Image (cartoon, helix red, strand yellow):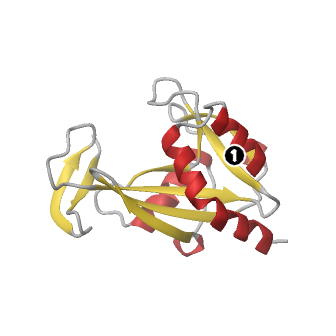
């Protein structure tokens, strides 16, 4: 059983926890973190959601819910390692921004890595595929609905920042 910290709308910790999978009450918020891993050559690392998960078979960036007691950077380092086997220090993640919806605060990051696909370790039950995709390929995957709408919208908002980082590596 997994628990997440409960935040208020202003992102203040309430001191209470939420059991994952249960409904959020009005005024309660969790924290979800996401990271775009880029190689500096115009590609982003995508993983495919495993069968049995929501949006199964669609491609996404790595991320997930922060566990109770974790801050945003601790959560993103853990999530990336769990989903790909890529280790990164918390300070290595570049902050892209935050957002909020009905019950979730989101933090978005990017990370420069050139990990070969044969060194990626997928988490059974979470991910069942991995690929490096160019920006053009990501756009085609969005057009053909291979990337779920939520991740697609996130990518489209953050694409300019990600492109800047790609060219800064050249």
Q: Is residue 67 visible?
A: yes
Position above or below: 50 against 77: above
- Report whether 54 appears left or right of 156: left
Q: How many marks?
A: 1
Foreground: 71 or 152? 152
Residue 25 in the image: state x and y as whole percent: 14, 47
> Where, by quadrant of the figure, is residue 32 drawn?
bottom left
> Where, by quadrant of the figure, is residue 145 drawn?
top right
Residue beneath disc 1: 120
Q: Residue at x 52, y 27 (%)?
A: 56
User: Pointer 1: residues within 10 angstroms few (<14), some, or many (20+)?
Assistant: some
Q: Is residue 82 visible?
A: no
Element under label 1?
loop
Which image quarter holds the N terminus? top left
Residue 156 in the image: state x and y as whole percent: 60, 53
Q: Residue at x 50, y 55 (%)?
A: 34
- Report whether 158 appears left or right of 2: right
Position above or below: 144 against 157: above
Foreground: 138 or 21? 138
Which image quarter holds the C terminus? bottom right
Residue 27 in the image: state x and y as whole percent: 16, 56
- Report whether 115 appears left or right of 102: right
Residue placed furthest toward the top = 52
- Report whether 154 appears left or right of 132: left
Q: Residue at x 20, y 45 (%)?
A: 24
> Where, by quadrant of the figure, is residue 123 drawn?
top right
Residue 91 in the image: state x and y as whole percent: 55, 75
Q: Residue at x 77, y 47 (%)?
A: 136
């Amino acid at each position: 059983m997994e628990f997440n910290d409960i935040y208020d709308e202003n992102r203040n910790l309430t001191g209470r926890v939420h059991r994952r999978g249960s409904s959020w009450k009005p005024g309660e918020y969790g924290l979800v973190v996401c990271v775009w891993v880029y190689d500096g050559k115009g590609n982003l690392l995508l993983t495919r959601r495993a069968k049995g998960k929501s949006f199964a078979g669609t491609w996404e960036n790595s991320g997930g819910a922060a566990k109770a007691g974790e801050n945003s950077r601790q959560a993103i380092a853990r999530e990336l390692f769990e989903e790909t086997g890529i280790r990164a220090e918390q300070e290595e993640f570049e902050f892209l921004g935050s957002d909020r919806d009905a019950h979730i605060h989101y933090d978005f990051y990017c990370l420069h890595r050139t990990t070969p696909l044969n060194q990626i370790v997928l988490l059974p039950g979470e991910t069942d595929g991995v690929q490096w995709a160019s920006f053009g390929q990501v756009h085609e995957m969005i057009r053909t609905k291979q990337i779920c709408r939520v991740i697609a919208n996130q990518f489209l908002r953050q694409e300019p920042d990600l492109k800047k980082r790609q060219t800064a590596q050249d």
